[in-house]
Amino acid sequence: MSLELLVLNYNGRPLLAECLPSVVAAARESSRPSRVTVVDNGSTDDSHAWLRHQHPDVRVAGCTNRGLCSYNEVVAGSDAEIVVLLNNDVRLAADAIDSLVAPLIAGNAAFDPDCFLTAPRCLRFDGQTHEGEKTAVRWRWGLIEGTAFFPGHAEVIHQPDWTAAAGCAMAVRRDRFVQLGGFDPLYLPGRLEDLDLGYRGFAAGWHARYVPESLAYHRGAASFAPAFGASGCDALALRNTLLFQWKHLRHPWHRARGMFGVAARLARDWVVSSPDKRGATESFTRAFWDAWQLRHQARDSQYRATTSLVRERQFFARFHPSSLAPTAGRVPA
């Protein structure tokens, strides 16, 4: 069983210097044949020169800058059976790999034949602050939200379970990632691609697993925050949440909930804003307009999940915060 660790990079040489050595060390510590590849999105800094000098054994796959979608062609062309997808601001614990990929590999006690993706426990670089990646999905004012900070999350961060999505670090079965088509370019430049992938995997009859024995460290927003700012990141998240819902949700209850919630949000934007401040306060209105212009692409997307209304409801029930928190009293599937 071969593994390939893919690190996505764009003009991130300082981050590579800080994080890549831990990825290379984790690959060497794995009990399975592993190699490291940097997926470079057309960097114009000295990333390539630094890699040649400091890590000549690390392969570089050059791509056009398509965000996470750059993984699609690289994964499709890989001969590895399992691929680990990492942001360039992620460090790995030395023993992170074997436990992370165990549910994906037949012949060990952790193997789960219906698992297509696994996610590690993620901390900030301080080694103390929890970040994820056991992700629940909840509704807030007519919009869905994937979050690792649901009520009771602190009590279950050390317990394995399913997860709705995985962000900065994940391991995937290459064949199933390719079968799903990878990440959807509809969401470019980014936000919610991971939840979209998780939902499509669930619709296909698979699931993602949270593996707290595997540990990753994430700086967080190292690329997006400087490029878009906090308000720009929020606007992308709002726009892409709308696109996700228009693309996937078909259940009458979900559609009604989204419709009334969106109407309330639009009304709030206009009620609370004065004419002289309207441009600064209408964040949701602008995000809605940006999404509206892409609505046909969302509904006609080749990445659209084909699932029953029952399966759609099961997704929101399985990943509701009360299902992942200990107070629910459920027996894990």
Image: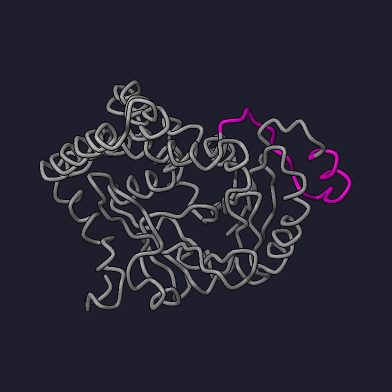
Kindly identify the residue that appears in the image at 28 percent across and 60 percent down: 319
Query: Residue 262 in the image: x percent, y percent?
Result: 23, 37
In front of the other: 258 or 211: 258
Tell me the magenta residue range: 47-66
Magenta-drawn stretch contains 179: no
Residue furthest out toward the right? 53
Query: Residue 282 in the image: x percent, y percent?
Result: 35, 32
Kindly identify the residue that appears in the image at 27 percent across and 31 percent down: 270
In front of the other: 228 or 103: 228
Residue furthest out toward the left? 252
Q: Is residue 106 above or below residue 38?
A: below
Kindly identify the residue that appears in the image at 43 percent across and 36 percent down: 235
- Quadrant of image for the C terminus: bottom left
Q: Is residue 126 left or right of residue 177?
A: right
Magenta-drawn stretch contains 65: yes
Quadrant of residue 114 in the image? bottom left
In front of the other: 103 or 38: 38
Quadrant of residue 239 in the image? top left
Kindly identify the residue that appears in the image at 29 percent across and 22 percent down: 296
- Quadrant of image for the N terminus: bottom right
Q: Is residue 88 left or right of residue 73?
A: right
Q: Is residue 3 above or below residue 108?
A: above
